[in-house]
């Protein structure tokens, strides 16, 4: 299968430019930097030890920020290259590190041998780290051919992903055995990787429990806060199609009891904003965009967040958060969003029944008594009413447990990476 996969990628090579142009036309690629996916690289490789971290999308990008913040303190590491695939992840990373001289972002090239080899020949990374489940066979093979240490960190192989790889078990073994170290996010992944042929597997827990210390990102504009200070606020975050309407219907139920409620909706993908506005307008709600917060008044029903990187700031002013990608049955095998950040900030977590991507984290938070499953808009509105009456955030002792769990995970992962930095 390795031969056929490689052949197919060679056959795709002449079509790669057209493929990216079409995606650019559909606003799925960066208007200028899309050529980086063809290994058209303008940045000169800096001198010294270069650490390369690859993430797929925005969720993985956010999960490694605490790790990157610690790694950049290492004197031996001169530069950290972070690659990603999606446009949304690039925006988050650029915003975070645009003024950091030690860290820079590039798009990962398509998994075509000529692009992969050009990328590796240019950057010559001293250590490569893949995050989560982002596995590209040609790239993995080329990395090992060049004797570059290859680590899989916070590995997460769902049942759906495992079954797909397991169909081609020899191909999977040929790929996964090339990783020098696999640090898994949960026991399920450990079992799956062992079956797929990976070696040197260790389980320290999920990096998504960790956070950046002393971050100033939670600060909201005092003027914005003044506009909403008298409101009862709740957030619906990382929502997917149909979930915004679900939450808006819950808001309508809430208004029957609490006229002072303000709902903040943070969609997972802001390119859907026009469609969401259209859907919610049919419910006769007064909606304001977060970017136009000056227009918010006491009559505003919903604030719709239309920029990335705002979630943590908004969690800090909410008593509870509904997390999306948890109500859609068609996404049952790829469901749920990370509940750690709102929990860490003292919010109770409400979610639908489908949370397969983060089942270990939800089980841990459930054991702490800070999550609740909801199934209907009426369930959601009633739960919010109860929390407003309760008027209590999560106990400080529970938050400390979450912090300690995350810090221990981060320390263990750093200790493992240090071994390959100091070789």
Image: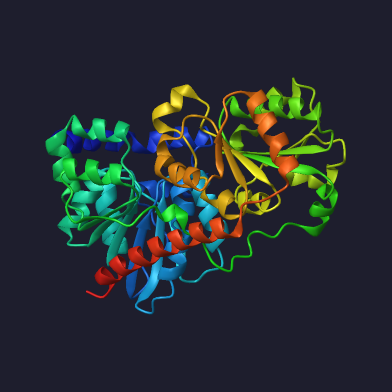
Q: Position of residue 221 (x, y in %)?
A: 76, 57
Asked whether residue 96 is in view, the answer is yes
The image quadrant of residue 280 is top right
Frontmost residue, 338 versus 114: 338
Work out which residue is located at the far bottom of the displayed protein and give it.
75
Work out which residue is located at the far right of the displayed protein and give it.
298
Q: Position of residue 406 (x, y in %)?
A: 44, 59
Frontmost residue, 256 versus 239: 256
In the figure, 187 relative to 158: above or below? below
Asked whether residue 124 is in view, the answer is no
Frontmost residue, 291 versus 154: 154
- Residue 74 is left or right of residue 113, and the answer is right
- Residue 364 is left or right of residue 154, and the answer is right
Query: Coloured how?
Result: rainbow
Number of dots carrying numbers:
0
Q: Position of residue 391 (x, y in %)?
A: 73, 47
Frontmost residue, 117 versus 191: 191
Q: Position of residue 275 (x, y in %)?
A: 65, 27
Q: Residue at x 54, y 36 (%)?
A: 27
Q: Residue at x 84, y 47 (%)?
A: 230
Q: Could you tell me which quadrant the C terminus lies in? A: bottom left
Q: Could you tell me which quadrant the N terminus lies in? A: top left
In the figure, 112 relative to 63: above or below? above
- Residue 171 is left or right of residue 383, and the answer is left
Q: Residue at x 84, y 43 (%)?
A: 295
- Residue 82 is left or right of residue 232, and the answer is left
In the figure, 43 relative to 321: above or below? below
């Amino acid at each position: 299968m390795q031969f056929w996969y490689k052949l197919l990628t060679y056959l795709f090579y002449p079509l790669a430019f057209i493929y990216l142009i079409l995606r650019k036309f559909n606003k799925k690629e960066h208007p200028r930097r899309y050529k980086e996916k063809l290994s058209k690289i303008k940045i000169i490789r800096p001198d010294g030890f270069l650490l390369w971290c690859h993430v797929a999308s925005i969720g993985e990008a956010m999960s490694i920020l605490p790790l990157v913040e610690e790694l950049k303190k290492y004197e031996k590491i001169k530069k950290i290259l972070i690659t990603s695939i999606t446009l949304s992840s690039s925006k988050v990373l650029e915003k975070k590190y645009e003024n950091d001289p030690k860290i820079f972002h590039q798009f990962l090239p398509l998994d075509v041998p000529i692009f992969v080899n050009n990328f590796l020949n240019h950057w010559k990374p001293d250590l490569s780290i893949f995050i989560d489940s982002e596995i590209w066979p040609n790239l993995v093979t080329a990395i090992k051919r060049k004797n570059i240490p290859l680590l899989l960190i916070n590995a997460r192989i769902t049942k759906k992903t495992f079954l797909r790889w397991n169909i081609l078990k020899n191909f999977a073994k040929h790929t996964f055995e090339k990783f020098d170290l696999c640090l898994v996010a949960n026991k399920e992944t450990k079992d799956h990787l062992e079956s797929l042929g990976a070696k040197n597997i260790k389980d320290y827990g999920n990096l998504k429990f960790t956070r950046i210390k002393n971050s100033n990102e939670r600060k909201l504009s005092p003027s914005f806060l003044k506009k909403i200070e008298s409101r009862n606020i709740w957030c619906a975050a990382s929502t997917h199609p149909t979930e915004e309407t679900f939450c808006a219907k819950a808001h309508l139920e809430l208004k029957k009891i609490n006229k002072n409620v303000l709902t903040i909706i943070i969609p997972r993908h802001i390119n859907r904003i026009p469609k969401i506005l259209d859907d919610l307008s049919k419910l006769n709600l007064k909606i304001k965009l977060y970017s136009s917060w000056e227009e918010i008044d006491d009559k505003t029903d919903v604030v719709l967040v239309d920029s990335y990187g705002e979630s943590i700031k908004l969690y800090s002013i909410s008593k509870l958060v509904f997390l999306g990608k948890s109500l859609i049955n068609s996404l049952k095998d790829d469901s749920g969003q990370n509940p750690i950040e709102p929990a860490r900030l003292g919010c109770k977590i409400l979610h639908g029944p489908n949370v397969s991507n983060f089942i270990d984290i939800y089980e841990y938070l459930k054991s702490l008594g800070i999550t609740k499953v909801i199934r209907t808009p009426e369930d959601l509105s009633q739960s919010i009413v109860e929390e407003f009456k309760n008027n209590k955030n999560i106990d400080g002792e529970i938050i400390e447990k979450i912090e300690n769990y995350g810090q221990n995970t981060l320390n263990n992962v750093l200790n493992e990476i240090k071994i390959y930095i100091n070789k």
